[in-house]
């Protein structure tokens, strides 16, 4: 389980909350629908570079397109088209932050295993990443747990409180007392 943030772009003058919920609800079942757009690919690369400059621990995940093609029973070329998003992760023994850059949206997730000082540090790191995403990508940040667009200057306390509730719930369900899993949660194959 993870705390998820959705990043979206909104047209000038558009209602932010409506834009946010429409973007969040429109997330497709397919990873990256539609054809490859070179301008969008360049923008994703530029945003990823800015994130890695801000946080050198973040590294792009390298997809095994042959394995994906085999698992999904599609061609390698189709696997490259569908899995063209950029996924940035910290080290295997890190804090579990994952950032995914799609053509028009992005997401940031963090597992529910941080408490106290660890939670404070991870949220500082996340806020740095969100500032880069908003500045470099023209995104705004929607928090589906709080059901609102975040103001990065004022909302960290509300987000951390909601995250703490998620940690407590996860610990109560898991009965593990908050122990972090041995294998990083994003490694699914």
Image: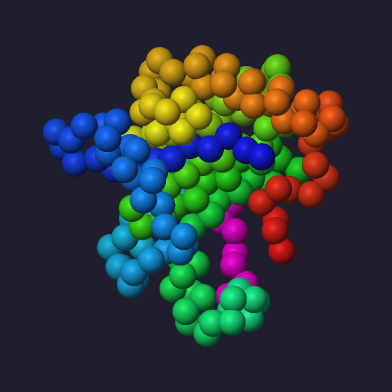
Depth check, front residue: 6 or 30: 30
Vertical side of 41 occupied by 141: above or below: above
Vertical side of 4 occupied by 185: above or below: below
Q: Position of residue 40 (x, y in %)?
A: 31, 60
The magenta segment: 58-66
Depth check, front residue: 4 or 49: 4
Total numbered circles:
0
Q: Position of residue 189 (x, y in %)?
A: 71, 64
Q: Residue at x 21, y 32 (%)?
A: 15
Position of 178 with respect to 149 (left or right) is right
Q: Residue at x 63, y 81 (%)?
A: 70
* Magenta highlight on residue 62: yes
Q: Position of residue 7 (x, y in %)?
A: 39, 41
Classify residue 55 by image quadrant. Answer: top right
Q: Position of residue 29 (x, y in %)?
A: 46, 60
Classify residue 177 by image quadrant. Answer: top right
């Amino acid at each position: 389980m993870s705390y998820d943030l959705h990043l979206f772009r909104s047209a000038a003058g558009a209602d932010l909350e409506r834009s946010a919920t429409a973007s969040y609800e429109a997330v497709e079942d397919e990873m990256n629908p539609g054809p490859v757009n070179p301008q969008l690919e360049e923008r994703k690369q530029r945003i990823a570079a800015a994130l890695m400059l801000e946080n050198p621990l973040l590294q792009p995940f390298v997809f095994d397109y042959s394995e994906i093609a085999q698992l999904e029973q599609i061609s390698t070329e189709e696997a490259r088209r569908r899995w063209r998003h950029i996924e940035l992760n910290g080290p295997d023994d890190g804090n579990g932050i994952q950032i995914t850059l799609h053509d028009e949206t992005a997401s940031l997730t963090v597992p529910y295993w941080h408490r106290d000082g660890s939670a404070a540090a991870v949220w500082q790191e996340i806020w740095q990443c969100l500032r880069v995403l908003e500045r470099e990508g023209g995104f705004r940040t929607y928090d589906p747990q709080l059901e609102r667009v975040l103001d990065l200057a004022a909302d960290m306390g509300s987000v951390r409180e909601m995250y703490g509730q998620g940690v407590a719930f996860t610990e109560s369900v898991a009965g593990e007392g908050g122990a972090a899993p041995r294998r990083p949660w994003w490694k699914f194959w």
